[in-house]
Image (cartoon, helix red, strand yellow):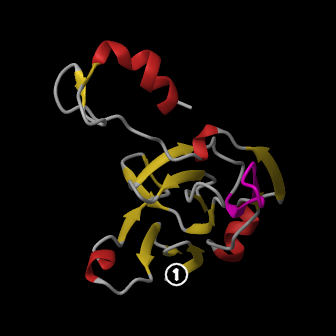
């Protein structure tokens, strides 16, 4: 069952109570439809038992097109949907994370913690969670990471001719690491 729906530039993402996120695209062409995927997240193994937590919220970064997911496990993760990787998982919060959002320029993330009624009234009585709202600055963890690919040892083929590896630290690697 879908719990959250969020738009990004070429498509949308949906989050479910089964601990999954699906990324799909609006373009009906076969090439675009081959890129859609779903993945498992907000899961944890406790005493050899797999626990699946609902994904409560999704928020796309306004600049870098990465997104944050928040779950009933009390965690917030930052994902790069193009390479299908988690970039960062923040430390666990004191209760289920019900909401997450970036500000308009993407320099801050807001996280809302409260009881989400996943376990009904019984869960509220046995595990009361005080509502909590926090805002923090975000850094490099929300940016898409660039990678340098090597074709042959000691040579990089990004330019029309090979560049010896010993020139990379001064000329290229500094630019790619910014």
For image coordinates 64% across by 56% down, the residue present is 63
Quadrant assignment, res 115: bottom right
Residue 101 lies, in percent from the top left, at: 72, 62
Q: Main secondary structure of the magenta part?
A: strand
Is 98 part of what is drawn in magenta? Answer: yes
Whether residue 2 sits left or right of residue 23 in the image: it is right
Residue 72 vs 86, above or below: the answer is below
Viewer-closest of 106 and 57: 106
Say whether residue 177 is left or right of residue 98.
Answer: left
Task: Describe residue 177's horizontal placement relative to residue 60 as left or right.
Answer: left
Instruction: Provide residue 158's location: percent of width, then percent of height.
Output: 30, 37
Q: Which residues are magenta?
A: 96-111
* Residue at 44%, 40% in the rendered image: 146
Please identify the residue farthest to the left as the structure is shown: 152
Q: Residue at x 83, y 60 (%)?
A: 131
Look at mark 1 in the image and give the residue it sits on: 2
Residue 73: x and y in percent read: 58, 56
Is 34 situated left or right of 86 in this image?
Answer: left
Seen in the picture, residue 134 relative to 141 is either above or below; the reply is below
Q: Nearer the viewer, residue 173 or 40?
A: 173
Give the answer, above or below, for where 165 lies relative to 138: above
Asked whether residue 51 appears in the rendered view, the answer is yes
- Crowding at dot 1, Cα within 10 Å, few <14 / some 14-19 / many 20+, comes out as some
């Amino acid at each position: 069952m879908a719990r959250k729906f969020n738009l990004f530039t070429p498509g949308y993402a949906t989050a479910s109570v089964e601990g999954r996120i699906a990324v799909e695209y609006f373009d009906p062409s076969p090439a675009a439809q081959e890129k859609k995927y779903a993945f498992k997240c907000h899961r944890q193994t406790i005493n050899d038992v797999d626990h699946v937590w609902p994904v409560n919220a999704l928020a796309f970064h306004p600049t870098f097109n990465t997104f944050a997911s928040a779950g009933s496990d009390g965690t917030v993760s930052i994902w790069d949907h193009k390479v299908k990787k988690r970039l960062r998982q923040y430390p666990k919060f004191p209760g289920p994370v019900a909401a997450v959002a970036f500000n308009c320029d993407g320099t801050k993330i807001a996280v809302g913690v409260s009881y989400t009624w996943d376990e009904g009234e019984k869960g509220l009585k046995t595990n009361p969670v005080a509502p909590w709202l926090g805002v923090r600055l975000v850094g490099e963890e929300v940016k898409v990471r660039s990678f340098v690919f090597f074709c042959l040892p000691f040579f990089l083929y990004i330019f029309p001719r090979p560049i010896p590896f010993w020139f990379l630290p001064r000329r290229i690697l500094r630019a790619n690491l910014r």
